[in-house]
Amino acid sequence: MSDNVLRLENITMQFGGVVAINNLSMRIDQGEIVALIGPNGAGKTTAFNCITGVYEPTNGAVYFHDKVIAAAHPTGKMVRMYAGSDPEKFKDMHVVMTPDRITEMGIARTFQNIRLFKSQTAFENVLIATHLRRTSNVFTAAFGLNYKEEKHNREKAMELLRIVGLDDVAGEKATSLPYGKQRRLEIARALATDPTLLLLDEPAAGMNPQETLELGEFIKQIKNDFNLTVFVIEHHMDLVMGISDRIYVIEFGKQIAEGTPEEIQNNQAVIDAYLGGNDE
Amino acid sequence: MFDRILPYLLAGISVGGQYALISVGYTMVYGILRLINFAHGDIFTAAGFFMVYLTASLPMTVSIPLVIVMTVALGFTLERVAYKPLRTAPRMSVMISAIGASYLLQNLMWYVTGGLAKQYPVLPWLSDNVQIFSASTKIVTIVTPILTIALVVALVALIRYTKIGMAMRAVSHDFEISQLMGIRINSVISMTFVIGSGLAAVGSMLYFTNYSTVTPTVGAMPGLKAFVAAVFGGIGSIPGAVIGAAVIGICENLIKAAGYTAFSDAFTFALLIVVLLFKPTGLFGEKTAEKV
Amino acid sequence: MKKMSKTRLAVSLAVVALLYLGAWWAEATLGTNSMLITVIKKGAVYALIAVSMNLLNGFTGLFSLGQAGFMLVGAYVYAVFTIPLKRHAAVYQYYNGGLIQFELPLIVALILAGVVAAILAALVGLPVLRLKSDYLAIATLGFAEIIRAVVQWDSLGPITNGSNLLKTYPTFSSTKIFGTTVLFPLIVSGICIGLILLIINSTYGRAFKAIRDDEVAAEAMGINLFHHKELAFVISCFFAGIGGALLAMFQGTVQANSFKSAMTYDILLMVVIGGMGSVSGSVIASFLYIACSEWWLRFLDNEMFIGSFQVPFLRSGFRMVVFSIVIMVMVLFFRKGIMGDRELWNLRLPRKKAKGRDKQ
């Protein structure tokens, strides 16, 4: 259980003069469900974007199964403007990977503001995500020489839709589905890339308590069925407390606490952050 | 050497000034609508034809202001008809509408003129010859850069110190927010087209005094070049557009001087691609304060 | 799109075969020089070019305006390599009979036209495909202009004949099938559009559409943006090259100066009228566009008298004015075009099945 899947070392993300994440370090182990919580604007989604290659961090390194997937240190104008810590520590490291490379390595994600392929059906949305593991090239694909793989992918996409309970709306336009279903479709799409680590960005946003409860069970179930490690950003505390093995709390880009749900619930800094006048 | 280059250099500065006057129209519209107004080059051509037809029956003193008024009206109408209905449409649709509008204007001009090249009237004084060092040239060559700079300075002052100028800056900074702040977006956009078309009309008088004939498609190439100038200078920046236009005008003529006339157009585009690759924001793209 | 059922595929192919047969019969009865045959040939050529552009603009969401440049390359490659040797002295009269002293079989030259355009596209794509939306448009437009200037460069004259015409290469009248000229362009264009359709319906086509819909999400699903954009660009330009070669065959002479940006705009308008993201739409629109501009609206260019009353406005040039007004109305009020992003053969049945000159 202690085989660590994801490790963040001193990640700082600075946009101009604004420090969105400040010296964040964390560790997620195989088979865990870890939550990242914090008030709005604390930098949670930015952390996801640094992990998935959407942003290149200003400083720090990200490891996935002990392989560096992102590493950077302040350069150019940022050297002067840099307001974070440890600018020297990663001096010799510079690794940039595009999001598709990172997905290929086994990290899949969903989006806070749902980003489905809007002209496509639910089924096609999932099917597109199987493109990553193709063995065909454009010629074999065009002439249907990959028909076995194509058939397998179609079955896989349908199976994933069944797992998330959307097989009955497979042929409908993705964007015509109700909000909750779109969120589940995003999860199915992420699973179709065969990940080992799943990043969920506010999967319960806009869901009612009943749906949230079901979602919690669902996340636990897919974690076991697909042998996943799950990293989730969420605001619904019931969900977070119900499913997480460990929780990280950040505020203004800085980690303020880390621990089991019980520890977090009794942590004074966390209570202050949430009740001390911050909007939540 | 200097004697040989001088006429080209003078022509370059002059053409650069003319491009600059067209370029301002592109850069302002792009700054506000994020739209490459493909029809702007045709507005420029239309101004040329207005002059041809007006001077046929009216004295020059009446024709010149009338040309400017008519060109401005055309630019205003173009915006109302082709772009305003697409305010919420995807950017690609608006661009396609711009291409369609350009197509329409060109065909309309072809229809009216019968496709024949029209002789541009000789503007008094501007067409007179003048001697500069060893080169003999028309007065327009000297007038163009001076007039261009004067107009651009006036425009920058307008944008910086007047209320409408402030509104323009606000709209180019954030379209939606300015709308919420009660700025009348449509009048700001119309104003942009009015200014752009007016300057294009002035540019066309200077340009055609040098080139003497007008055809329906003559504006396409200077139009594209002026757009490149705007990108080169940093789109949205008026001084940038002027400097970009000067650089393009001069380089183009120096290339002609070197004997590669066929490449003078290609050069402009090569320059564009190099700029886009290495400094996509252009020379002055970063100074958002100058954005319009 | 949904997988096409076997019956629909069979019906569609049968309809295409019937249309081909009809075209053959029309030429056999009306003669090669009839307006209908000219329009069908030119329409077939433009259908291929419009579909190739739709692959980029409609399916992959890349707003490229370089089509004319790549057509030019295709047209020149075809013409240069198929001018009969004994005609070289006459064609390359200013360049001592030219540099290339061999000729290729027609089909080989046609494919080579596509290949050269594709290679050039691969090179051009490396820098420009990293640009976004309208910057991409203006950069590709710029490249097309550069290509046009380079081809006319005097130093390349021994190959390209500089700014002079290329002529006497084989045209559609030398590719008669069953005694008619109309089948060759229809068949070549049909095969090429068929290939594009196969690509669009494959997993790669889905990836293209994903990029069009949402680049960020596509990348997060493991789709390498640059690789796929480059692929779409190369494929599109390959077929644009072949389309250019067909256009050269149609025209009988070819000269770089006719491949201006206006030509790209024409094709773009066909794509828009047909519907961005619809292959059958592009095909229908191409035929309509060509028929209107070459044929049906011709009468607008001629002065007309009813009795002694002269119909106003009708004179040379009016056709194009009416035509461009129609286009503007389409662009402003029917933004989805004829087909939107649907295909004829996927329409629900109560409507008449494939009736146009779909899917050449």
Image (tube, coloured by chain):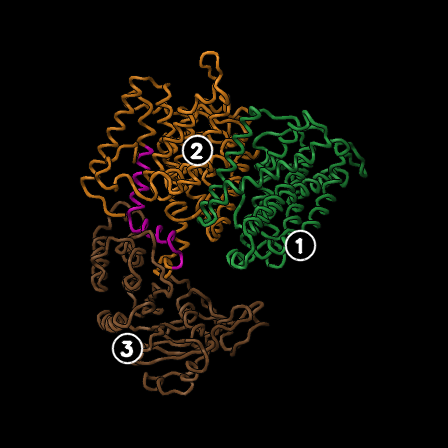
Chain colours: A brown, B green, C orange
Q: Residues within 10 Å of mark 3 (few under 14, many from 20)?
A: some
Q: Position of residue B55 (x, y in %)?
A: 68, 27
Chain identifier of the residue bearing label 1 in the image = B
Chain identifier of the residue bearing label 3 in the image = A
Q: Is residue C73 visible?
A: no
Q: Position of residue C303 (x, y in %)?
A: 48, 17
Outermost residue toward the left in this view: C7
Alpha-carbon span between mark 1 and mark 3: 60 Å
Q: Is residue C337 visible?
A: yes
Residue drawn 69% across the image and 32% down it: B63
Q: In the rendered structure, does residue C203 fall within the stretch colored magenta? A: yes
- The residue at which mark 3 appears reads as A243
- The residue at which mark 1 appears reads as B162
Quadrant placement of the C terminus of chain C: top left
Q: Quadrant of residue C221?
A: bottom left
Alpha-carbon span between mark 2 and mark 1: 41 Å
Q: Which residues are magenta?
A: C188-216
- The residue at which mark 2 appears reads as C326
| Kind of residue indicated by mark 3 | Ile
